[in-house]
Image: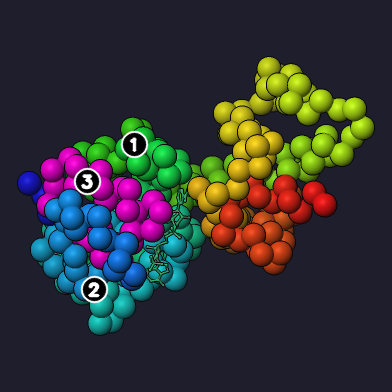
Amino acid sequence: MKNVAFLGLGAMGVRMAANILKAGYQVTVWNRTPSKAEQLVINGAKLAETPRQAAQNADVVIAMVRDDHASKEVWLDPDTGAFNSMKQGATAIDSSTLSVKWVKELHQHASERNIPFIEAPVSGTRPQAESGQLIYLVGGTQEAYESSKELLETMGSVINYTGEMGNGALAKLCTNTLLGMQVATLAELISTLQRQQDSDVEKIISALSSTATWSASANSISTLMLKQIFAPMFPVELIEKDFSYMLEATGHTSPVIEAARDVFRKGIDTGIGDENMTAVIKLYQS
Ligand code: NAP
């Protein structure tokens, strides 16, 4: 049975690591804040003190951390980074949502060390991470993708191969741009409907949902906004990060994407960065 090291036990990582453990793999975990590993350790995972220590006996090392900066630290820190200790033939997988520029740079660092590496960002949020229903958007060599697929299937229901390194990040950032656009637009539309005299917002939304313009995401976004449920699933600050990475990939030539990014940025400035992305409707409600 393969040894897997899992680095980063935030809202997504802790649920993903639990599924690997449940599937019977030997799992060593590491998190910057070690207390988040408690339940996994009770369930049989080993706890490492550094990414380097977690990675040393692993056949596969997976990172699921916040952003480019955190990814750089866990893989490349000169003292504690996982690349310092990975054994010959072990595969590195980064599932964090990263910029295209960084993921290519990270691939270069892995290649220089002869470490097979794939990017494997995911679509889906906490419930999908918990139930092993994530959708993977893998980029890298076909060979590394094939050899990692069985492990990824313990956490995901669809494992897409998007091609060479960087395609996974692009696919993920496009997905979140489409998602965030709907959040930003529905925040304006729903708050406008709520301000109209005599409007029946629920009936209008129900009618909209019967048209071809509606989407599965629009359903959950509008429900959360109408019920004022803003507990974090995918927080404002994470989607703002992803919009910024998307804008970097476009070369900052996308006024519509930039305008949507600024909605989430305004959300952070007004103190709702750690609430769910749907909380941006509050920007238009008095
Ligand atoms: P999260 O709950 O905020 O967890 C972030 C993780 O990154 C934590 O383990 C955190 O450690 C670690 N981290 C942050 N900065 C670090 C640093 N400088 N060095 C080392 N570790 C660091 O975020 P999440 O929701 O799990 O998301 C993780 C990744 O998945 C992000 O890239 C996100 O964009 C992406 N994603 C999220 C969702 C979602 O719905 N939430 C869905 C798909 C993809 P501490 O515990 O010590 O803070």
Q: Secondary structure at mark 3?
A: helix
Q: Is residue 8 magenta?
A: yes
Q: Residue furthest left?
A: 1
Q: Earlier in the sequence, mark 1 or mark 3?
A: 3
Provide residue 239's location: percent of width, then percent of height: 57, 54
Q: Is residue 71 left or right of residue 267?
A: left
Q: Is residue 5 above or below residue 163?
A: below
Circle 2 sits on which residue?
A: 50
Q: Would you call the spot at circle 3 few (<14 residues within 10 Å), some (14-19), or many (20 or more)?
A: many
Which is nearer the eye, 253 or 75?
75
Instruction: Report the residue that reaches farthest toward the right.
Output: 197
The correct choice, above or below, for 57 with respect to 149 in the image is below
**Dot 1 corresponds to which residue?**
131
- Residue occupying image coordinates x 45% and y 43%: 125
- Amino acid type indicated by mark 3: Ile
At label 1, counting other C-alpha atoms closer than 10 Å, the crowd grade (few under 14, some 14-19, many 20 or more) is some
Of 53 and 22, the residue lying toward us: 22
Residue where numbered disc 3 is placed: 20
Measure the alpha-carbon separation of dots 2 and 1: 28 Å
Q: Secondary structure at mark 1?
A: helix
Q: Amino acid at mark 2?
A: Thr
Q: Which residues lie in the magenta part?
A: 5-31
| Image position, residue 87 (x, y; %) | 12, 65
Q: Nearer the viewer, mark 2 or mark 1?
A: 1
| Mark 2, secondary structure of its residue | loop
Q: Indicate the amino acid at tag 1.
A: Ser
Q: Which badge, 2 or 1, comes first in the chain's sequence?
A: 2
Name the side, left or right, on which 52 lies relative to 278: left
Location of residue 120 in the rendering, given as x and y in whole percent from the top left corner: 36, 49
- Up-down: is 159 above or below 111? above
